[in-house]
Structures are given as C-alpha cells and as structure tokens.
Amino acid sequence: MAKPKIASDWLCGCAGCHMSLLDIDERIIAVAELADLRSSPITDLKVPDITGVDVGILEGGINNTANEEVALRMRKSCKILVALGDCAVFGGVPAMRNFFTLEETLRRAYIETESTDSEGKIPDDPELMRPTQVRSLQQVVPVDIFVPGCPPDADTIFYVLAELAQGRIPDIKGDKLHWD
C-alpha cells in the first residue's frame, strides 16, 4: 500500500504552527516513514500535487483573495483538511483587526507607525485594498479536523500527523489540548 501524501501551506498568520511542526525534531523521520510529506512552505515543493493528496494542513486565517485561493485549492486537492492552530480554527490574533475598518488598519500599518518615515503611504495594490475581514478556515471551506493552539505544541502535531499517516482520525482532547 502506498504511503499517504501530506501537504501543508500557510495563510494569514505568523508561521508559528509550521515552526512548531519543525519542533517535532527527529520524530519527523517517523512521520516520513509512514507518510509522503509533499508540498509545504518549509520544503522546495510549494503547491500540492495535481493528482491530489490524502491530507492537507492549513495554518492561518483568511484575510484576502490570495488566502482564499490557497484554501480552495487545498480543499479541492485533499481528502482530509486540517485547520492547524488558532488562526485557522477561529481567526486568532489576525482577526483582531476585524474590530477596525480596513482603512483604519492600513493607515496605522503604513502611515502612523512609529517607524514609518515621512513619505509613508498606503500601497496601491488591488489585493491589499480589497475590504475583507479575517475569517477562520471553516468560514471559507469545509474542515475535517481542528487542531487549536497558538501554536499547537510539537507533541500534539506529531500525534495528529502520526494518526493521519496511519489512516486514523486523531482524537484531540485532554492532554492534546493546551491553552498556554
């Protein structure tokens, strides 16, 4: 039997979930023995296989059309979709900008920051200027598994990957949930 294919990508967030994935250290070898680790922001291959993957993992919220396209492509390309981390699960820290207008957010980021020079201006880019709220992954595509945490710890990520690689749906509760 062929090893299941796993792909990951990141959306609007800090990349902390992928850093936590790397924190599984040498256990990545055990995962690689069970699964074919494909595209990921931390590998050379960045886009899921055209033929699809068994498991897709997305971290981060969705705050623009580029993130939406990545989420739609991953959902279409995988059998099981995992929302990894608080940003993917419920919007996380990036969703705090939803309390302000897009204009207020961009003005603060590009003009009013203490480090902005006197020439500061809001970039004129249609992608950036599209008024969008930060959304969780499930607000855009169906999600099969939710792994909360900011970021989820390495032990939980290893458990989830190992279970999925062996064809099992992980049961994420008890000691697998950390709120620190």
Image: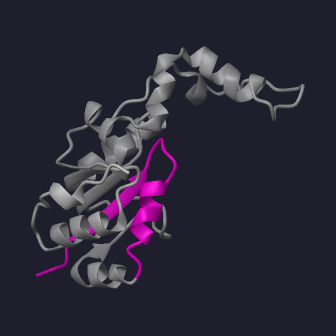
> Is 160 within the magenta?
no
Quarter of the view holding residue 109: top right
Query: Residue 11, image x and y in percent?
Result: 45, 45
Which residue is pictured at 30% across the width and 69% down the height?
Answer: 155
**Front residue (pair 141, 102):** 102
Task: Tell me where the magenta segment starts and ends, as one range.
Answer: 1-25
Which residue is pictured at 44% across the width and 30% down the height?
Answer: 95
> Is 23 within the magenta?
yes
Left/right of residue 47 with respect to residue 80 in the rendered view: right
Label count reads 0
- Residue 40 shows in the view: no
Left/right of residue 2 with respect to residue 112 in the rendered view: left
Query: Residue 163, image x and y in percent?
Result: 16, 69
Query: Residue 10, image x and y in percent?
Result: 44, 51
Q: Residue furthest right?
A: 118
Colour mapping used in the image: one colour
In this rendering, the answer to whether 101 lies above or below 78 is: above
Quarter of the view holding residue 174: bottom left
**Front residue (pair 81, 180):** 180
Query: Residue 18, image x and y in percent?
Result: 44, 61
In this rendering, the answer to whether 51 lies above or below 149 is: below
Which residue is pictured at 21% across the width and 73% down the height?
Answer: 162
Quarter of the figure that contains the N terminus: bottom left
In this rendering, the answer to whether 143 lies above or below 153 is: above
In this rendering, the answer to whether 143 lies above or below 96 is: below
- Residue 97 shows in the view: yes
